[in-house]
Image: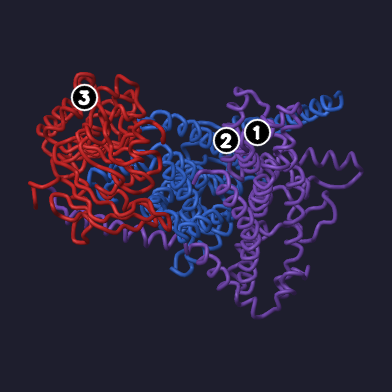
Chain colours: A purple, B blue, C red
């Protein structure tokens, strides 16, 4: 008979090891926030927070680190992206879950997974090759002068990147709405579309909302693809045909200079922290909604 | 009556159009990258490192980036798996299951999944400086491990959650300890799903640029130690794209196509493996 | 250790899931090497009682257990007792067959390997012996290494029986072991039980009265968490003393 004490010892040691790793995993988010805060501290103590966040004066050489142009840049690109992505995603999700024949669904879903896995730089290259020239043509047709490196290009590329997230979550949420609702309304003589409207509006909208919010948070943090097509000019955009300079691009483009001025590094770390906080707010909001939904619909 | 039917037809049309746009953009990406990348791909492109400097040198290929990316992604994925598996298993009902600790941890990990990779790069940079490291393979692996960790933990967790409680009870009923049940039964049952999560994380690791930007450096050589800087395919695209020299640009296009092929390959492999490993009980 | 008295003795056992009382003050002796059937309407606590015998109730969150369960005279809920040893003494057959995610051979060998049997030949012999006892050997002897998931439900349940026997328990606990099976497989399992009772004490939970009539030597009738009546099968099933038992046996409550 194998030694019981040895087996119990293995069990105990394994449990201790798993516990400590899990504590580490649970604390990781906190550690990252603290780490960034630590590095951003020098500039936070030197300049008031509202000047950092709301001033549009970004001149590192003169020690002016106003981030508002970048925050606005991020918001512009993200909003444009979501305006494009949300209607298209919801329409696609409804089609896939309610109307599409199994063959099409079986084809499109793996494609979406593939889309989700494509690296950011590849999207950026695609943006450069295809989107930027097209947008430049559109601008010319509208009589606006733009070389194509602007908010609209960034928004379009970002929208394509956000599709898989919003579509797959929305589709799942729609599918979990109980069949009873559909059948009941169709039994009363409604068309399939009317039944679908009811389902979306009533049953699935919190989940779809969460999917959109999650999409938002992904869009905010997306770095490389946007960087390559958005123009990177440190001024708040005033139209979709203006270039912008989102926060992630700011950090990515200037990491080399970080070494020279300690205050510069601090400012960039602050930018990263602001980015993290923005993403956090959206992420947590989405997660809370999703968890509530999971509890409502699943059997635990 | 007519109005309802018209409305339905209208929206049906919209929906199909939307789906077409989504699918079309994917196809567009493939077409564009293949169009530019295929002519750039050659045997020498994938077997040679850049000659004369990666930014200006006309000769050579992207072997530095291919090998570099593999080193980075394999290292990070292995390390992440080592850390993720115990955590994912610990989150199960056998251990801390429904406790608030588990809920908070899962929430925190879900948030981490959405954290932009550039933040991981910045944080990885902070750690590197703290440890006195320079931009290197090790630094890149550290940043990528952090990036992959939430993906892997939650991926494995989702599969492990689905293991039927009765199956575990059958093991307990025969006198197995919790550890034995977890290793001998749960791990077998989750194998295909866990592998999918690993491949997903690996794909993320090999394609990510922002996190390795500060931490891994770049070079035209193949690293010989963990402390050497290392090239990567995403950065190969990024750095070599804006050069005035066409041969260098070719390397960027080739890198992009190679990345795309890798992603496609991973996707197919993960489906094949999942199907092959379905020996277990599917309920 | 007392090997002469009843195999399992329950003394003042009460089980609470949070505030809900699942079992209230159960007192009964389970006879040795007989088939005991626990019957009663759904929700009466029969499965809970069964799971107390091998301490599977420990795995439920928020459970509180008071009282004693004595196996061969020793209280298995005593702090100093090792729960894995308790479980080794009881083989469990669940309602739905749950083979482990491995080959047929490995399923049966799981228990013995856990408890230290590593010798290849001895394992082979053990696997064959228990598969024969469960009545499955002839059907699988040619494909022992193939995955257990490929067996039919009836075969899987017999595999689970073989698996449970392989840890060399003293008692076999069955939680509605045939209710998910087709009639032929169900009969096979019942035949196996009849053969096995010469060496093992068997306790089955069942909601099929006819099954209880066919198999049971001793019967426990439970209702709403209380043990209403127990005694020899003849008496409880044909001439019960309690009104509620009478009502159930006649099919009035279910």
Protein chain holding label 2: A
Of the two numbered discs 3 and 1 in the rendering, the one whose residue sits closer to the viewer: 3
Distance from label 2 to label 3 (Cα)? 54 Å
Horizontal and vertical percent for residue C22? 37, 51
Q: Nearer the viewer, residue B282 or B32?
A: B282
| Marks 1 & 2 on one chain | no
| Residue for badge 1 | B26
Can see residue B67?
no
Which residue lies under the disc numbered 3? C191
* Mark number, residue A114: 2
CB-based contact (under 8 Å), mark 1 and mark 2: yes
Q: Residue at x 73, y 37 (%)?
A: A198
Chain ID of residue with mark 3: C
Tell whether B155 sits left or right of A76: left
Horizontal and vertical percent position of residue B239? 60, 49
Write the residue at 60% across / 24% down.
A102
């Amino acid at each position: 008979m194998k030694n019981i004490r040895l087996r119990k010892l293995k069990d105990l040691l394994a449990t201790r090891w798993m516990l400590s790793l899990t504590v580490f995993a649970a604390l990781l988010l906190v550690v990252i926030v603290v780490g960034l805060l630590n590095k951003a501290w020098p500039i936070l103590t030197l300049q008031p927070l509202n000047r950092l966040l709301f001033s549009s004066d970004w001149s590192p050489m003169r020690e002016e680190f106003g981030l508002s142009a970048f925050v606005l840049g991020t918001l512009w690109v993200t909003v444009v992206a979501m305006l494009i992505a949300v209607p298209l995603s919801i329409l696609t999700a409804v089609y896939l879950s309610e109307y599409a024949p199994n063959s099409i669904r079986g084809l499109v879903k793996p494609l979406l997974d593939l889309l989700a896995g494509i690296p950011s730089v590849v999207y950026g290259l695609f943006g450069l090759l295809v989107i930027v020239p097209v947008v430049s043509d559109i601008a010319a047709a509208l009589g606006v002068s733009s070389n194509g490196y602007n908010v609209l290009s960034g928004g379009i590329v970002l929208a394509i990147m956000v599709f898989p997230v919003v579509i797959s979550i929305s589709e799942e949420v729609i599918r979990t709405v109980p069949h009873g609702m559909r059948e009941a309304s169709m039994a009363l003589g409604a068309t399939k579309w009317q039944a679908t409207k009811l389902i979306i509006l009533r049953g699935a909208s919190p989940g779809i909302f969460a999917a959109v919010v999650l999409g938002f948070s992904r869009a905010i943090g997306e770095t490389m693809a946007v960087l390559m097509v958005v123009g990177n000019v440190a001024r708040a955009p005033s139209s979709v045909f203006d270039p912008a300079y989102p926060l992630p691009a700011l950090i990515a483009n200037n990491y080399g200079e970080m070494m020279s001025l300690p205050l510069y590094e601090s400012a960039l770390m602050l930018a990263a922290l602001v980015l993290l906080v923005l993403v956090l707010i959206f992420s947590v909001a989405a997660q809370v909604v999703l968890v509530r939904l999971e509890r409502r619909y699943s059997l635990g | 009556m007519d109005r309802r039917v018209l409305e339905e037809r209208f929206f049906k049309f919209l929906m199909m159009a939307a789906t077409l746009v989504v699918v079309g953009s994917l196809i567009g990406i493939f077409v564009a990258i293949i169009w530019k990348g295929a002519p750039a791909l050659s045997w020498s492109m994938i077997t040679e490192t850049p000659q004369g400097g990666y930014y200006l040198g006309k000769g050579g290929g992207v072997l530095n980036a291919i090998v570099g990316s593999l080193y980075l992604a394999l290292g990070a994925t292995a390390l992440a798996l080592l850390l993720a598996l115990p955590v994912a298993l610990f989150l199960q009902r056998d251990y801390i299951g429904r406790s608030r600790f588990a809920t908070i941890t899962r929430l925190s990990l879900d948030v981490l999944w959405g954290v932009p990779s550039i933040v991981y790069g910045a944080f990885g940079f902070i750690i590197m400086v703290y440890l006195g490291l320079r931009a290197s393979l090790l630094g890149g692996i550290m940043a990528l491990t952090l990036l992959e960790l939430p993906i892997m933990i939650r991926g494995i967790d989702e599969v492990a959650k689905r293991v039927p409680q009765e199956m575990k009870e059958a093991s307990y009923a025969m006198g197995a300890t919790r550890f034995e049940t977890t290793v001998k039964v749960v791990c077998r049952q989750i194998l295909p799903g866990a592998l999918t999560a690993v491949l997903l994380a690996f794909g993320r690791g090999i394609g990510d640029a922002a996190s390795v930007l500060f931490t891994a450096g770049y070079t035209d050589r193949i690293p010989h130690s963990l402390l050497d800087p290392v090239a990567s395919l995403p950065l190969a695209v990024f750095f070599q794209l804006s050069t005035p020299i066409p041969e260098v640009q070719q390397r960027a296009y080739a890198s992009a196509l190679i990345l795309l092929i890798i992603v496609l390959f991973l996707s197919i492999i993960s489906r094949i493996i999942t199907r092959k490993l379905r020996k277990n009980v599917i309920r | 250790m007392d090997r002469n008295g009843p195999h399992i003795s329950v003394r003042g056992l009460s089980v609470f899931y949070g505030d809900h009382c699942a079992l209230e003050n159960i007192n009964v002796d389970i006879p040795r090497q007989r088939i005991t059937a626990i019957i009663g309407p759904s929700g009466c606590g029969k499965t809970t009682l069964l799971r107390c015998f091998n301490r599977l109730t420990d795995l439920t969150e928020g459970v509180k257990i008071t009282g004693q369960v004595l196996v061969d005279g020793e209280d298995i809920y005593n702090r100093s007792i090792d729960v894995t040893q308790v479980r080794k003494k009881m083989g469990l057959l669940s309602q739905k067959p749950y083979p482990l995610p491995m080959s047929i051979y490995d399923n049966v060998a799981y228990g013995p390997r856990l408890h230290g049997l590593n010798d290849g030949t001895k394992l082979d012999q053990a696997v064959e012996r228990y598969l024969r006892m469960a009545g499955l050997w002839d059907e699988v002897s040619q494909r022992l290494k193939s995955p257990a998931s490929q067996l039919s439900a009836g075969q899987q349940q017999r595999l689970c029986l073989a698996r449970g026997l392989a840890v060399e328990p003293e008692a076999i606990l069955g939680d509605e072991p045939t209710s998910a099976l087709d009639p032929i497989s169900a009969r096979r399992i019942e035949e196996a039980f009849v053969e096995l009772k010469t060496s093992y004490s068997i306790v089955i939970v069942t909601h099929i009265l006819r099954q209880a009539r066919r198999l049971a030597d001793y019967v426990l009738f439970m209702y709403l968490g209380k043990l209403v009546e127990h005694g020899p099968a003849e008496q409880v099933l044909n001439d019960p003393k309690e009104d509620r038992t009478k009502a159930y046996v006649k099919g009035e409550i279910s």
